[in-house]
Amino acid sequence: MVRREEIELLISPEGEVKFVIRGIVGSGCEQVAKNLAKDLGELRDWVKTTEYYQLEEKRTIHSRKTDK
């Protein structure tokens, strides 16, 4: 099953930006947050959700060469 990945951006009237990352677990979530912070400015708070602590899915692609 493929997870739905989304980023919700909330911008206050004062210009403060808050983002919530859903569907990305573990270090992938952290990397997305750091990349967003680079574009949006200083990262002041970091709250890890339960999704952060879930195991990352390992994806393996198998291919087989066929002779024709």
Image (cartoon, rainbow, N blue to C red):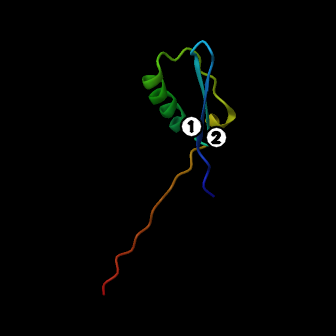
Q: Which residue is mark 2?
A: 54
Q: Secondary structure at mark 1?
A: loop
* Residue depicted at 57% across the width and 45% down the height: 56
Label at residue 6: none
Relative to 37, does residue 1 appear above or below in the rendering? below
Identify which amino acid the numbered label 1 is placed on. Answer: Gly
* Residue depicted at 48% across the width and 15% down the height: 42
Residue sitting nearer the eye, 2 or 57? 2
Q: Residues within 10 Å of mark 1 (few under 14, many from 20)?
A: some
Determine which quarter of the picture holds residue 11.
top right
Q: Which one is earlier in the sequence, the residue at label 2 or at label 1?
A: 1
User: What whole-number distance in Å separates the C-alpha atoms at marks 2 and 1?
Assistant: 6 Å
Q: Secondary structure at mark 2?
A: loop
Residue sitting nearer the eye, 59 or 20? 20
Determine which quarter of the picture holds residue 55.
top right
The answer to the question of whether label 2 and label 1 lie on touching residues, with beta carbons closer than 8 A, is yes
Determine which quarter of the picture holds residue 61.
bottom left
Residue found farthest to the right:
50
Q: Residues within 10 Å of mark 2 (few under 14, many from 20)?
A: few
x and y, in percent, of residue 25 in the image? 59, 40
* Residue depicted at 49% across the width and 34% down the height: 32
Q: Is residue 22 left or right of residue 59?
A: right
Q: Which residue is mark 1?
A: 26
x and y, in percent, of residue 2 in the image? 60, 55
x and y, in percent, of residue 16 in the image? 58, 16
Identify which amino acid the numbered label 2 is placed on. Answer: Gln
Relative to 26, does residue 64 appear above or below in the rendering? below
